[in-house]
Image (cartoon, rainbow, N blue to C red):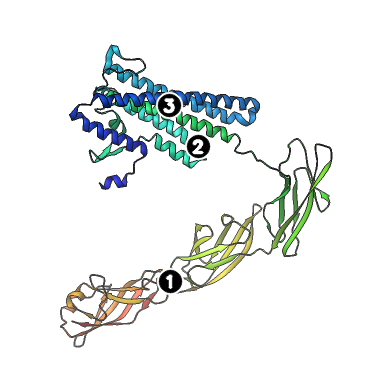
């Protein structure tokens, strides 16, 4: 049953899966005429729904055409898309209609109803499988349904809920069958050992879904013709600056516009009593005065009655020195040999327009103002920050960091299970033990150290220098319970390639 939880079913898949299960279970009992009559009733009801959809869709297309005649420029794009939807819908609808008729012809032969409505061999279990599975038409139908679904999803790209709806309605994914306890291909679930009456009803349901989805899409496309329209009840002046923050010595630029402007009339723009060009662009070079500043003006426009109306505006902006904020996310220093995380921000400049260079090291750009800085030299490194303003790079500041070697880590003697036994270990534990050097799980600085060498000392035995992190087994074999093992002169090397002495460890043999 775990597979069902990992493969959530769409409503259509649940319906098909349930029908597949019920019909398969009925095979041993022979399908009753009452059940087949039920399919016929559902099929007739679906045809009635389709007829209603056709009437509704025709009215929608007629209204769409009328809107186009009133405003071709505005409606053309959306009407073309609507016509494309109609052509795609008709093509798939007609294909399914022929699909049904061909199956009925196999079942009823020369007595077949050309509209696949009156079926004599309603309980025939072979016709659908012969045509759809053995004849390969089922996979062809699946591909056409997938293509149609893709068209609807693409056209409704501004409405995720509609996209989800179309994907669910026309899903042809494998269906998890509780009867077989496995996934079943869509065309197998629909056509294998299924009565003709049931197959025809399911296909009519698809036709009904096509007409219903067509209606939904045409209404959606009609709504898009007005999506970019604005409804206003007043006229006011607006100032649209490139940025309210401007650096000293740099150009300030703003667009001054009148909302709800009639495109047949040209407003006049004034700032500080000086008239601007007809495009309404206002530019100036910021002076040496830092901080908040403002300017004001008006837009003049002649009304339909010939009276000139004035619309006042006022805009505030900020003048600041070029500056950058640089911080080390880990510590106030840069450590040699490891990744040091640096954050950089420049007030008034977007992160994507900020970049750095590093004198005395290298860096990796992580995006959004975050960097990894590395250095292998001693002394200091310098991080220079630049911002792109008006398509040119400006120096925004710099920061100097001291380069330090990594501090000594702690040293631990861990048994074969990775446990530290607080100064007492058995000989067996010592034979599988390893020396480990690290800053521990709560380390602020991520760094890996390797044990280079150490010396094993026990009273009564000659000291033994050892390379690596494992204890010498021959030396351990000479020990007995109650002895104290001194591990001294421990040396480790970190990513900064500096060999450090880490003190000693005393272990009592249990």
- Residue designated by label 3: 49
Q: Is residue 369 left or right of residue 38?
A: right
Q: Nearer the viewer, residue 122 or 190?
A: 122
Quarter of the image with the C terminus is bottom left
Which label number is shown at residue 261? none
Secondary structure of the residue carrying numbered label 2:
loop
Relative to 391, residue 193 above or below: above
Q: Residue at x 32, y 23 (%)?
A: 40
Q: Residue at x 17, y 85 (%)?
A: 482
Calculate the distance from the C-alpha at mark 2 to the C-alpha at mark 3. Answer: 24 Å
Q: Position of residue 421 (x, y in %)?
A: 25, 77
Give the image quarter of residue 98.
Answer: top left
Q: Nearer the viewer, mark 2 or mark 3?
A: 3
Relative to 271, residue 416 above or below: below
- Residue designated by label 2: 156
Q: Residue at x 34, y 21 (%)?
A: 100
Q: Nearer the viewer, residue 419 or 450?
A: 419
Relative to 478, residue 154 above or below: above
Q: Residue at x 35, y 22 (%)?
A: 99
- Residue designated by label 1: 444
Give the image quarter of residue 245.
Answer: bottom right
Q: Is residue 352 visible?
A: yes
Calculate the distance from the C-alpha at mark 1 to the C-alpha at mark 3. Answer: 68 Å
């Amino acid at each position: 049953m775990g597979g069902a939880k990992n493969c959530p079913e769409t409503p259509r898949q649940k319906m098909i899966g349930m029908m597949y299960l019920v019909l398969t279970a009925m095979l041993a009992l022979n399908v009753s005429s009452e059940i087949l009559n039920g399919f016929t009733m559902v099929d007739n009801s679906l045809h009635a729904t389709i007829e209603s959809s056709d009437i509704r869709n025709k009215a929608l297309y007629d209204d769409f055409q009328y809107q186009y005649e009133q405003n071709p420029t505005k409606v053309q794009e959306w009407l073309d898309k609507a016509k494309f939807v109609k052509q795609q819908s008709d093509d798939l609808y007609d294909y399914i209609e022929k699909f049904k008729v061909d199956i009925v012809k196999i079942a009823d032969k020369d007595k077949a109803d050309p509209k696949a409505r009156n079926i004599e061999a309603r309980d025939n279990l072979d016709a659908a499988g012969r045509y759809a599975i053995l004849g390969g038409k089922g996979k062809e139908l699946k591909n056409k349904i997938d293509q149609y679904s893709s068209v609807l999803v693409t056209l409704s790209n501004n409405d995720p809920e509609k996209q989800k709806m179309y994907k669910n309605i026309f899903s042809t994914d494998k269906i998890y069958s509780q009867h077989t306890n496995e996934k079943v291909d869509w065309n197998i679930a629909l056509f294998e050992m299924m009565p003709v009456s049931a197959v025809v009803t399911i296909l009519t349901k698809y036709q009904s879904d096509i007409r219903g989805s067509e209606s939904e899409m045409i209404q959606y496309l009609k709504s898009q013709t007005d999506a970019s329209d604005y409804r206003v009840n007043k006229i006011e002046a607006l100032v649209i600056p490139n940025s309210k923050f401007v650096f000293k010595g740099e150009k300030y630029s703003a667009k001054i516009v009148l909302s709800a402007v009639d495109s047949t009339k040209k407003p006049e723009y004034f700032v500080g009593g000086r008239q601007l060009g007809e495009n309404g662009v206002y530019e100036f070079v910021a002076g040496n005065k830092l901080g908040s500043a403002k300017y004001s003006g008006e837009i003049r426009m002649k009304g339909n009655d010939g009276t000139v109306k004035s619309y006042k505006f006022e805009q505030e902006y900020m003048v600041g020195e070029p500056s950058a904020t640089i911080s080390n996310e880990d510590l106030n220093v840069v450590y040699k040999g490891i990744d040091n995380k640096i954050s950089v921000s420049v007030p008034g400049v977007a992160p994507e327009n900020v970049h750095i260079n590093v004198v005395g090291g290298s860096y990796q750009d992580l995006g959004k103002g975050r960097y990894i800085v590395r250095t292998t030299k001693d002394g200091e490194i310098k991080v220079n920050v630049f911002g792109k303003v008006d398509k040119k790079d400006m120096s925004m500041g710099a920061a100097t960091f001291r380069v330090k070697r990594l501090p000594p880590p702690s040293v631990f003697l861990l048994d074969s299970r990775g446990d530290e036994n607080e100064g007492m270990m058995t000989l067996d534990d010592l034979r599988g033990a390893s020396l480990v050097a690290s800053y521990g799980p709560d380390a602020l600085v991520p760094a890996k150290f390797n044990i280079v060498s150490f010396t094993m000392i026990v009273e009564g035995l000659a000291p033994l220098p050892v390379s690596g992190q494992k204890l010498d087994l021959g030396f351990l074999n000479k020990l007995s319970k109650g002895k104290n093992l001194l591990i001294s002169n421990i040396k480790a090397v970190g990513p900064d390639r500096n060999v450090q002495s880490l003190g000693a460890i005393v272990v009592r043999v249990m």
